[in-house]
Amino acid sequence: MPLNIPAITTLLSQVTSPKTILASLTTRNGGLLAYYSPNQPEEFAKTVAALAAGLLVSSPSSNPLSALCELGSLYVLVLEPYFLIVLLGDANPETVPTLALKARLLEDRLREPLSRI
């Protein structure tokens, strides 16, 4: 069963805000499947996806994973077995709890459709 990218993109759009710059669903190796960002192009989303996958490889025991980088506050949640939920917020460490909450919300909303793949 193929992924319903428009439906996933709609879910991702529901968690973006002025402080949440980007929401995406990627593969564990950094391939971008779906993303939503009101102000950033697809190339930016691909860069964030690759960064998230690289961080996960360098710290495989951490799930979820959060990091502060030049792009902002990055939050990565593994959606077993194949996917990552990646959220990027503004460069404020206080943003991470909000990103974590949004990632859990996405995890709950995405888990059922993805389990049918």
Image: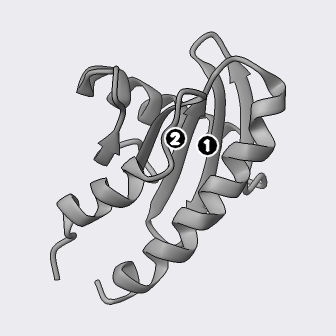
Please identify the quadrant where the C terminus is shown: bottom left
- Indicate which disc residue 35 carries: none
Q: Nearer the viewer, residue 11 or 87?
A: 11
Q: Secondary structure at mark 1?
A: helix
Give the residue at x 34% y 40%. 36
41 with respect to 57 (left or right): left
Q: Residue tagged by mark 2?
A: 53
Residue type at tag 2: Ala
In the figure, is residue 72 to the left or right of 115?
A: right
Q: Quadrant of residue 47?
A: top left
Q: As displayed, is residue 40 above or below residue 87?
A: above
- Which mark identifies residue 57? 1
Between 29 and 48, the one nearer to me in the picture = 48
Tell me residue 108's x, y (percent). Answer: 56, 75
Q: Nearer the viewer, residue 111 or 55?
A: 111
Is residue 85 shown above or below 89? Answer: below
Secondary structure beneath dot 2 equals helix
Report whether residue 49 is seen. Answer: yes
Task: Kindly identify the residue that appears in the image at 44 percent across and 66 percent down.
Answer: 82
Report x, y in % for residue 98: 73, 45
For the question of whether residue 79 can be seen, the reply is: no
Cβ atoms at labels 2 and 1 below 8 Å apart: yes
